[in-house]
Amino acid sequence: MQKISGLTGSKLGGAAILMELGSQYGVLDALRETDQVSVGKLQKISRVNGTVLADYLDALAQAGLLRREGNSASVVYQVTAEFETVVNHVGYVAWALNACAPLLNNALAFATDNEAAQACYPREGGVVARTSQWMGATSFYPQPEDAIVRMVPSRIMDLGSGSGSLLTRLLNRVEGSSGIGIDLSGQATAQAQELARLNNLAHRLEFIHSPIQALIDNPHYLEGVEVVHAGFVLHDLLPAEEAALEGLMRAIRAQASVRAFVIVDAIPAAPDEWERTFAAAFNHLHAHFMSRRLLAEDEWREKLTAAGFRHVVIETLNHPGGRMIIASP
């Protein structure tokens, strides 16, 4: 049998199992955000006992994703150089086959009675947030993260903050900054609060369990915020809540302290070969299984201009069909 090296389907399959287990155990984000860990350190946030946790970390080491160091009395684990790359690739597979499983497994029901199927087979928000975060590890987080760091904001807001990884990284990179995250998932919000405590950022980070539309009627959350980030969350308001999207843009523009609104989202059709396949599938699922409408680049520019933003810059992300839109007063 011919042996195949590199990032193969079997390697992704094995890694996907290990990443999902780590997420369920409550330790994957900690592995990704800290340089070196031990069973004792992770036990403080883990949802499983120390024996299960130690066996799991050893499995990651056997897979070549962690490096086991020390002796039996004092064992520590160091993530390997390829860890984040593997997480990123696994994210696409897990998003497609796990987060979208209710849609794919019931495709005929959606084709027969779309409205009833949407009511019966919704996606689980926590899984969507988790797998999207894995996709973004190297595909669509670095660009907006670097752009925000260059702005040196004193306070950052993340709409759809998920498990808090982006804000955690930003606060570690921007000295003295503070942050506030808003997310509809209670599970993700709890994970974000745990991650903030693990990184000794609880005094600088606040996470709110709430729909992002709440900012329209409660703009006080925006007080002092200099940069607002929204990663793949605004398209969930279209087309049914288009007025809410526009109201949200106006509320952010009306806050005097806001210097930039950084949006990361997908466009309905991507022109380049490297991005066409995933972008087409992403748009098809959103349009025909979730009744979502993705905005083209010109539509984003028109909406932001109408909300009062004078400068709008759009960049292509290292994510198929992904765009970064930076709007400023």
Image: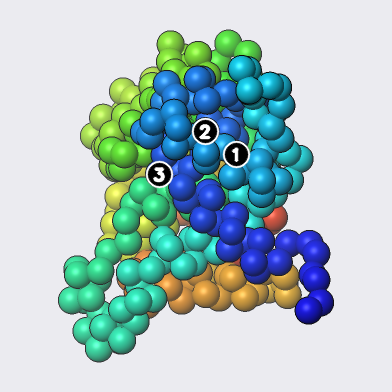
Per the image, the residue denoted by label 1 is 58
Q: In which quarter of the image is residue 100?
A: bottom left
| Helix, strand or loop for disc 1 | helix
Report the Cα–Cα distance between label 2 and label 3.
Answer: 15 Å
Quadrant in which the C terminus appears: top right
Residue 304 can be seen, yes or no: no
Quadrant in which the N terminus appears: bottom right
Instruction: Choose between 218 and 140: the one closer to the eye.
Output: 140
Instruction: Say if mark 3 contacts mark 1, CB within 8 Å.
Output: no
The residue positioned 71% from the left and 26% from the top of the image is 69
Per the image, the residue denoted by label 2 is 54
Instruction: Choose between 10 and 106: the one closer to the eye.
Output: 10
Counting residues from the start of the chain, the first of labels 2 and 3 encountered is 3
Report the amino acid beneath label 2.
Ala
Instruction: Say if mark 2 contacts mark 1, CB within 8 Å.
Output: yes
Q: Where is residue 311 in the image (x, y as percent from the top left)?
A: 61, 42
